[in-house]
Amino acid sequence: MEQNASRIAEILLGLEDVNLIGVEDLDDEGVKLPLRVHIEFSA
């Protein structure tokens, strides 16, 4: 199982050279809302 946050972001988002800053679960009282993924690009 992958543990590296940057690698997980690459796999999930199809983006290379990114750093995963955080993920917010906006679920509120059983209402299904999307996750908010915070990333930064490495240049």
Image (cartoon, rainbow, N blue to C red):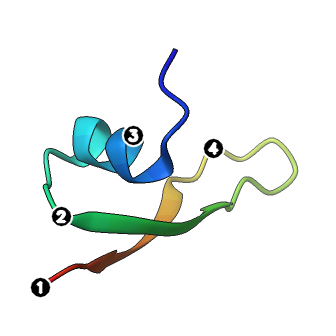
As drawn, the label of residue 17 is 2
Q: Determine the CA span between mark 4 and mark 2.
A: 30 Å
How far is disc 1 from disc 3 in space, using C-alphas? Answer: 18 Å
Q: Residue at x 51, y 65 (%)?
A: 36
Q: Which of marks 2 and 3 precedes in the sequence? A: 3
Nearest to the observer: residue 21 or residue 32: 21
Q: Residues within 10 Å of mark 3 (few under 14, many from 20)?
A: some
Identify the residue under disc 1: 43
Question: On the picture, is 31 further left or further right than 16?
Answer: right
Depth check: 4 or 28 in front? 4
Instruction: Sort mark 2 into few (<14), some (14-19) or many (20+) by Cα contacts within 10 Å.
Output: few
**Residue ID for mark 3:** 8
Q: Distance from label 3 to label 2 (Cα)?
A: 11 Å
* Alpha carbon distance from label 3 to label 4: 22 Å
User: What secondary structure is found at the residue carrying circle 1?
Assistant: loop
**Are dots 1 and 3 in contact, CB under 8 Å?**
no
Mark 4 against mark 1, which lies toward the viewer? 1
Asked which secondary structure carries label 4, the reply is: loop
Q: Amino acid at mark 3?
A: Ile
Q: Which mark is residue 32?
A: 4
In the image, taking residue 10 as reference, residue 16 lies left or right, namely left
Q: Amino acid at mark 4?
A: Lys
**Circle nearer the N terminus (1, 3):** 3
Give the CA separation, mark 4 to mark 1. 34 Å
Q: Nearer the viewer, residue 19 or 12?
A: 19
Residues at badges 2 and 1 in contact (C-beta under 8 Å)? yes
Residue at the far top: name it.
1
Q: Who's the residue at 38% across and 68% down the image?
A: 19
